Image: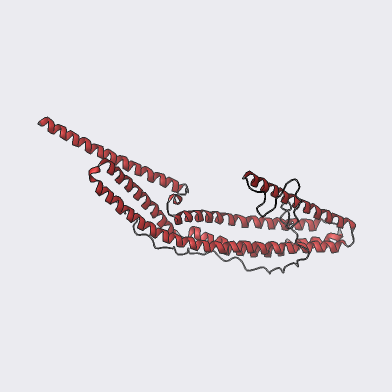
Amino acid sequence: CCAAVQMHKLASLSAELKSKVQDAGSALSDVRSRVTQQVIDAAGGGAAEEDEIPELQQHARIDASLRRLYERSDKYMRALNQVCEMSRALSEDFANVLADPALGQAASAFKAAKGPHAQADSTVLGQVLYRNVFQPVRREVEGRKDFERRLADRKKVRLDYEAFRRKQVGLLQSDPTNKSVYEGNLEAAAKTFARHSEGVARDVAAVNAERQQMLSVAFAGLVLSQLEFFSSSAGALEDVVVAASAGGGGSATLERDWARMRGEMAQLVANAQQQQADKAAAAAAREGERPTRSGGSRSSSTSQPLPDTRPSSYVPPATPSAPASHAAPSRPSPPPPLPPAASEPPPAFGAPAAGAKGLFC
């Protein structure tokens, strides 16, 4: 009898020890998951993209794009300012070195086009980009601290739910006698997590819509400001061409030089367009599609060069020419200096979540 009692105690002790080992293994697995998630977050990984909520996946994509826009819009303005500065320096060098009296008026017009006029145009472009692209994107990237904290809570809630669910599933397998208890725990946890997910999805969808509206305005600002800048630059350069023609009088040498340069640029444009057409046709052929999607076929060996409809990419940015039939647009006077950056971040969207921890404990 004593031996039977001892055996029963040993069996109970062994079962208890086995249960504790399983719990310890589950806890270790949860710790590893959390550490891995923290490492991914610290490294800038797309943790939110792992979430099954479509709104959160879209938010992750938009947020990544905003951060790229924030960095690249600043680089764009710096590069453009450098281009304008170098164009001004080149115009001054030519104005100082050209000895042909026939080109004196053209050199002066070129210096003016790349001096005060270009400075005014670049200032307008900079103001539009700063107010409608750089500043709004910066507010979105840096100004939603409360919302970002709620997203961090969402990650913790999701990890807690997954850990709890794994533990209950393990108990279902190791303790089938209490199956109904564990199944009830799983069902209650799933409902709690679903309610939390619905609230997060609503708030994230609202933020996504706000950001899409901001991006729409920023895109319009970028396109229209560039159109104004390059149109004004093209008009000013057309004045240079007119001045050169007037200053050259009937000089056969000047007419020949300028005609040769126009012909060279037209050929470069045609070559570049043909190369792009050949690449597109080759890519379409590799995909098993027709060379053109708009009807008709195109053969790289028999196609003719496309008409000259835009400046060549081989020509420096400072030397585009506008059609002679277009009148040069009026140039704006220098606008006021840039406004100071916003000192306060915008309000966060969506009320902060209540304590996200302990939902499934």
Residue drawn where x is 25% and y is 37% of the image: 18
In front: 184, or 290?
290
In front: 119, or 348?
348
Q: Is residue 146 visible?
A: no
Q: What scheme was used to colour the molecule?
A: secondary structure
Residue drawn where x is 55% and y is 61% of the image: 215
Query: Where does the image place residue 48, in percent across and percent down from the top left?
Result: 44, 52
Q: Is residue 49 visible?
A: yes
Residue drawn where x is 65% and y is 61% of the image: 226
Occupied quadrant, residue 262: bottom right
Report the side of 233 relative to 126 (left or right). Answer: right
Query: Where does the image place residue 161, in percent across and percent down from the top left?
Result: 34, 50
Query: Where does the image place residue 23, in percent across and percent down from the top left?
Result: 28, 41
Residue 33 against residue 137 in the figure, above or below: above
Query: Where does the image place residue 207, in percent across and percent down from the top left?
Result: 46, 61
Quarter occupied by the N terminus:
top left
Residue 264 against residue 222 in the figure, above or below: above
Outermost residue, left side:
1
In front: 138, or 335?
138
Residue 167 against residue 53 in the figure, above or below: above
Occupied quadrant, residue 116: bottom right
In front: 229, or 279?
279
Outermost residue, top side:
3
Occupied quadrant, residue 91: bottom right
Report the side of 288 relative to 322 (left or right). Answer: left
Residue drawn where x is 90% and y is 57% of the image: 252
